[in-house]
Amino acid sequence: MKKALIIGAAGFVGGYLIDYIQKKCVWSIIATKMPYEDFEYPEVKIFNLDIMDKDSIVNLLREVHPDYIFHLAAQSSVALSWKNPGLTVDVNIKGSLNLLDAVRELDYVPRVMLIGSGEEYGFVLRDEVPIREENVLRPGNIYAATKACQNMLGKIYSQAYGMDIVMIRAFNHIGPNQAPIFVVSDFCKQVAEIEKELREPVLYVGNLSARRDFSDVRDVVRAYTFLMESGVAGQTYNVGSGEAVSIGEILQLILEFSLKQINVEVDSNRIRPVDIPIIEADIEKLVSCTGWKREITLRDTIKETLDYWRARL
């Protein structure tokens, strides 16, 4: 039985990845969390781990001896990266480098998956859409720059040291239990609060014209497991739906499900210093390698996310 280690499992994606592996893969699962995080899962052995401590990573890898390593630990908010660039650099670059160096010290070669972002492509030219993996990277925010650096480090380590590393550029993934610092969860939470009369019937938004490629997180983790088994070492794969929609279209879908009449107002505090007009994935490489296809519609994901906030509130 293969052993899968999920680093940073207490975040949004970790639980969904564990669920899918338990249902569909004949792998045992080991997971890590930060010491302050409250995270438990049936039949999963969980360790405390700070990826800023390389020696702790080395010790853990030698103890559990994983075949597959999913590196999910990250500072993944674009908005927060503007407010705290130092933290974003530390976690996303230095933390990833610590993991790669720890793996390099092992006496065997596990497969490592580094999770990057479609944000790495940044300012895409009109004739470059949809974006292929070979496209020039022009990061437009600090989070994107750190993920582009992680990708370059992964490629260098794969080539220089013969390490088995697969790199992902994951486009926007959404679903129930996502933190409201992300746009879809934020809008759904605001609507649920309005429905329960916890706030005035006004939904505050930022830039509605930006177009992004949204996928359900359950489809995304399925792609991760497919690529863990079938991806080519040293290669980068886009993971997304292959179709960009505007934030305004997302908002209209959410408002369709609302039980209240809601006004929309732009909040200047929600406008980013720099915003990329469109990010849309070309997923031909993923599909040809794995046969993956999207299974959950955007409409269904939004409805489930709104229902999640209704239940939670």
Image (cartoon, rainbow, N blue to C red):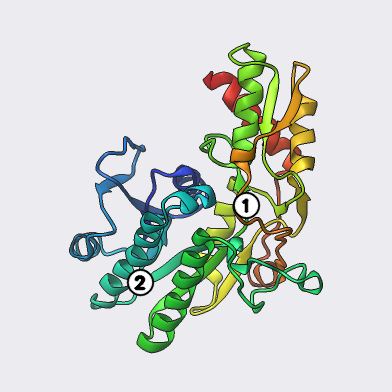
Q: Find the distance from the CA under tag 2 to the CA under tag 1.
A: 28 Å
Q: Which is more toward the observer, 200 or 170?
A: 200
Question: Residue 67: x and y, percent?
Answer: 36, 66
Q: Answer with left or right where residue 238 lies relative to residue 229.
A: right
Tag in front: 2 or 1: 1
Q: Residue at x 57, y 42 (%)?
A: 182
What amino acid does circle 2 point to?
Pro
Question: Is 197 rendered above or below residue 214?
Answer: above
- The crowd level at tag 1 (other Cα within 10 Å; few <14, some 14-19, many 20+) is many
Amino acid at pointer 1: Asn
Q: Residue at x 61, y 72 (%)?
A: 138
Residue 129 location (% of width, % of height)? 77, 68
Secondary structure type for disc 2: loop
Precedes in sequence: disc 2 or disc 1: 2
In the drawing, what numbered circle is on residue 172? Answer: 1
Q: Quadrant of residue 262?
A: top right
Q: Is residue 59 above or below residue 296?
A: below
User: Which residue position holds label 2?
Assistant: 110
Where residue 8 appears, x then y in whole percent?
37, 51
Whether residue 261 is visible here, answered yes or no, is yes
User: How many C-alpha atoms fall within 10 Å of the one at disc 2: few (<14), some, or many (≥20)?
Assistant: many
